[in-house]
Amino acid sequence: MKIEIHGGKSSLEVADSTFGAAFNEALVHQIVTAHRAQARRGSKAQKTRSDARGGGTKPWRQKGTGRARAGTIRSPIWVGGGRAFAARPRDYEQKVNRKMYRAGMRSILSELLRQERLVVVDSFECENAKTREFAAKLESLGISTALIVVDEYHTKTCLAARNVPDVDILDLREVDPVSLIRYPTVIATAAAVKGLEERFA
């Protein structure tokens, strides 16, 4: 299939399997959920009665005091004691097979193209590290909020984009499902599109 490059003067030949796949909502949901879960820190930790400082001796003898028996002042029912069911550091990572991940990414790319949210350009580089120049490039495309996917970083373009709100630049090797669906428009260079085709073939 052919994707028209912005301007209408040329087109890009891409594989139907990558940019013409059917939309699989369940699979896309799975890979997005897995990607977001992998970003969770899972570092929450609380102390049990054995972790709380103190409580090494029995506060009073077992019998004869008229009080309930107690073995430690760090029991969960005591003020200053440990938690009964303390939270522990955990890993939220969900396993997604490589074949499933690639199929999900192909599904997202194909849906972006069908919804006309994927804009392909020959190149997207700024000659100077000027925000004004970068903003003018976006304005010429009629876009204000977008993810820009490039085949390799251009230092001056990245510097020019830093002060522009709601715009992000990613190398094609860093593209993930969340970033693709987060923005209303994805601008990709022709070289980046071919790179995505090879990556998710």
Image (cartoon, rainbow, N blue to C red):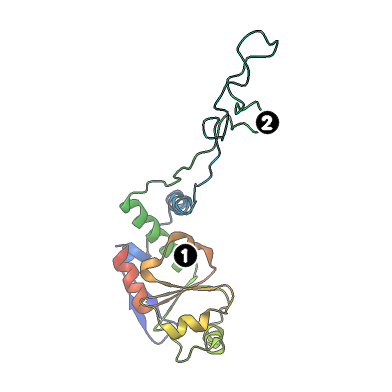
In depth, the one of 12 and 73 nearer the eye is 73
Residue with the mark numbered 1: 180
Looking at the rendering, which quadrant does residue 48 occupy?
A: top right
**Residue at point 34% right, 64% down?**
18
Looking at the rendering, which quadrant does residue 69 occupy?
A: top right
Looking at the rendering, which quadrant does residue 136 occupy?
A: bottom right
Q: What is the three-letter code of the residue carrying label 1?
A: Leu
Residue 107, image x and y in percent? 40, 59
In depth, the one of 176 and 44 nearer the eye is 44
- Which class describes the residues within 10 Å of circle 2: few (<14), some (14-19), or many (20+)? few
Give the left or right position of residue 13, taking residue 129 as reference: left
Q: From what the image shows, is residue 75 above or below residue 25? A: above
- Which is more N-terminal, label 2 or label 1? 2
Residue with the mark numbered 2: 79
Whether residues under marks 1 and 2 lie with C-beta atoms below 8 angstroms apart, the answer is no
Residue 130, image x and y in percent? 53, 89
**Residue at point 58% right, 24% down?**
72
- Which class describes the residues within 10 Å of circle 1: few (<14), some (14-19), or many (20+)? many
Asked whether residue 140 appears in the rendered view, the answer is yes
Q: Residue furthest right?
A: 66
In depth, the one of 129 and 180 nearer the eye is 129
